[in-house]
Amino acid sequence: MNIKIIGNHFMARKSGNQTKCGVELNTYTSNIIIIGNDIASGTYGTTKVLNGGSNNIIHDNVGYITEKSGTETIPEGSTSITVNHDLASIPKIVTITPNKQTDFWVTDKTSSQFTINIPSSITGGVSFDWYAEV
């Protein structure tokens, strides 16, 4: 059975010297669906969602970005570009589509960025459409 948490406003709270996160799913949680909530306010700069469980689905929440896309260009003379994705955590999925025929690969996925690489510089540079998902 799934538990669905939809349309709520989550706010972290301060308890003594300890700041609690807006949503905490511990290791015993599974199959929780958190969609369409506001997790943006009152987080004291801490983790907005702590997902320690398994098979939980968290997306389409204000303040907790789980999907993003864009276009980046590796200019002529370069062989890589670092993309700042602004996602809530390290993306599990990164999909890349180049606008010219070239080999490419993704490295250095972190909670704030990833790098698109090509084997050698391309005359005129090469643009990539990208999609990343937590």
Image: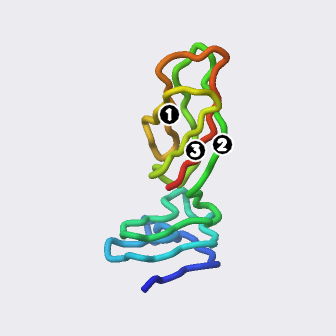
Q: Upstream in the sequence, badge 2 or badge 3?
A: 2
Q: Residue at x 42, y 76 (%)?
A: 31
- Around disc 1, counting alpha carbons within 10 Å, would you say few (fewer than 14), some (14 to 19), or many (20 or more)? some
Inspect the image, locate mark 3, and give the three-letter code of the amino acid beneath it. Answer: His
The quadrant of the picture occupied by the N terminus is bottom left
Q: Upstream in the sequence, badge 3 or badge 1?
A: 3
Residue under label 1, please give it: 115
Q: Upstream in the sequence, badge 1 or badge 2?
A: 2
- Around disc 3, counting alpha carbons within 10 Å, would you say few (fewer than 14), some (14 to 19), or many (20 or more)? many
Left or right position of 52 against 80: left
Q: Using the numbered discs, state the Cα–Cα distance from disc 2 to disc 3 in whole angstroms.
A: 9 Å
Quadrant in the picture for residue 65: bottom right
At mark 3, the secondary structure is loop
Residue under label 3, please give it: 85
Q: Using the numbered discs, state the Cα–Cα distance from disc 3 to disc 1 in whole angstroms.
A: 10 Å
Residue under label 2, please give it: 70
